[in-house]
Structures are given as structure tokens and as C-alpha cells.
Image (cartoon, rainbow, N blue to C red):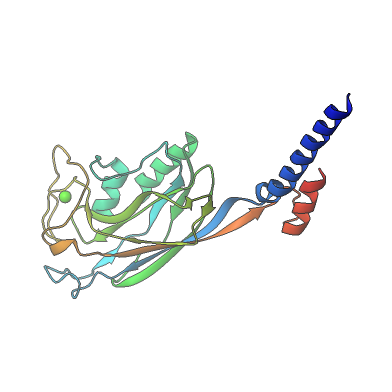
Amino acid sequence: MSTRRLATFACCLLSVTIYSIATAPMAAAMDSSAQCTATFDAIWSAGTHPTEFPPNAHFSGLIGGTHGDQVVFWEPAGLATPGIKLMAETGAKSLLQGEVDDAINAGTAAAVVSGGSIAVSPGSVAVDFDIDLDFPLLTLVSMIAPSPDWFVGVHGLGLFEDGQWIDQIVVDLPPYDAGTDSGITFLSGDAPTVPPEPIEQISGHPFIGGTSMGTFTIDCTSSLIFADGFGDGTTSAWSATVQ
Ligand SMILES: [Ca+2]
């Protein structure tokens, strides 16, 4: 190898080494998973929604899952699945949980997220869950109860943004109609909608103005996964540099 070629080779080797030193610690400190808490703060009361405010106003137990973008459990303008229909009409979790389980078996979801109810609204309830980069979306719902087929929730909410897990996100919760029962008041008897209609946000009677029913606040803490397995940034950077 000529002196010039040797110098070029050494230069390139140095560049690669510097590049490795500069980038290895960041790559080694990949936040591949996070621990999150979803807190449902319900504000629904006779004060916020005086029109036909029912006795025993409450919300059914939180149900949903963590998943990827290959599966949708519900969305506005879509038809309710059997699981969303049952949740919105009765508050029962079983069918929707089964749909999440089916998605887990199909490799499109990671875990069921199942939490408590709000026995008396206004009130709060929280549920913890883990999430990872392969399935960084959250779907979570709760029935507005009593009601014909009304519910609140999020669908495909992304918790990994701009290369990192979100610290906190607050989502407003308007009422949605599942499109499976045609009752028009909180206490209407069963009146199946045949054929079913698309899910849509309710902005009229009895939710005059579409007033929010509350919020979901999602807080996440990421878990640093280091290449050397020591869980220490300094050690990891050194290990990556000398490799
Ligand atoms: Ca309806």
C-alpha cells in the first residue's frame, strides 16, 4: 500500500472511529419500551350536562389494548365491532377483550389493557400498562352509563413521537355513538339500529355543544435498554466505543 493510500485508509478509519464514538452511545441507549399510566378523569355531572342528566351516572371499566397500526378496534365513521357494540351498550368487556386477544394471536397487538370503572361520575380511575416499539399505539374505551350505545375513548393513540416516548399527553373525551342502538336519551329502552350506522361523535341532544365528558391523561416512563446490559449510560458508552 502506498504512503498516500495508507494515509487515506488511516483517515477513513479515524472517521469511522469518531463516527462510532459519536453515535454508539445514542444507539445503545435505545428506549425500546415504557411503563405508562392512563388516568381517566370524568367530569360528567348535572352541572356539565344538565339535559336529562340520569341517576346513577357512571362509566364502565376501562378496556382496550396496546397494538400496532395493522389493527383498528374502532374509529369514527367505522362500524362497531361486536366488542365495541357490547361495551357501548352494556359496559361488558368480554367481547372487546376477545378481539384484542385475537389481534395478539395474529401478531398485531401486544396486550390487553383492562382497568376499573368510575362508579360515580364525576370521578377518576387509572390503569397501568407496558408498551414497546413494536406496538406503540393505545386503544382504550369506557361506556357512558346509563346510555343506549354511547362511549368515550381513544383509538390508535401513538405514545412514541419524535424518537422518544411521550412524557405526558392529555386527550379530551367527547361522547361517541356506537351506531348500534337508536335510543335518544340516557334511559331509553333497547332499540337496535338495523342496519347499524357508523360510529360518530355526538354533538347534539343530550350532549348540547358536544361538551367534553372528561380526559385521559397518559403518563409514560421509558426504560433505557443498554447494549452492555449494565443499565448505566457511562459504562454503555465506553463498551460501545471499544467494540
Ligand atoms: Ca346510537
The foreground one among 228 and 78 is 228
Left/right of residue 165 with respect to residue 56 in the rendered view? right
Name the one closer to the observer, 187 or 226: 226
- Image coordinates for residue 227, horizontal then vertical, percent: 72, 47
Closer-to-camera residue (180/222) = 222
Q: Is residue 84 placed above or below 119 in the rendered structure?
A: above
Q: In the image as oriented, which residue stretches furthest toward the top?
A: 1
Tell me: residue 114, above or below residue 13: below
Q: Is residue 142 left or right of residue 14?
A: left
Res. 80 image quadrant:
top left
> 40 or 96: nearer the eye?
40
Measured from the top left, where is residue 198 in percent x and y?
A: 20, 42
Q: Residue at x 36, y 59 (%)?
A: 61
Where residue 190 sits in the image (x, y, percent)? 14, 51
State left or right for residue 20 relative to residue 103.
Answer: right
Residue 232 visible in the current orientation: no
Report the side of 170 relative to 106 (left or right). Answer: left
Quadrant into which the N terminus falls: top right
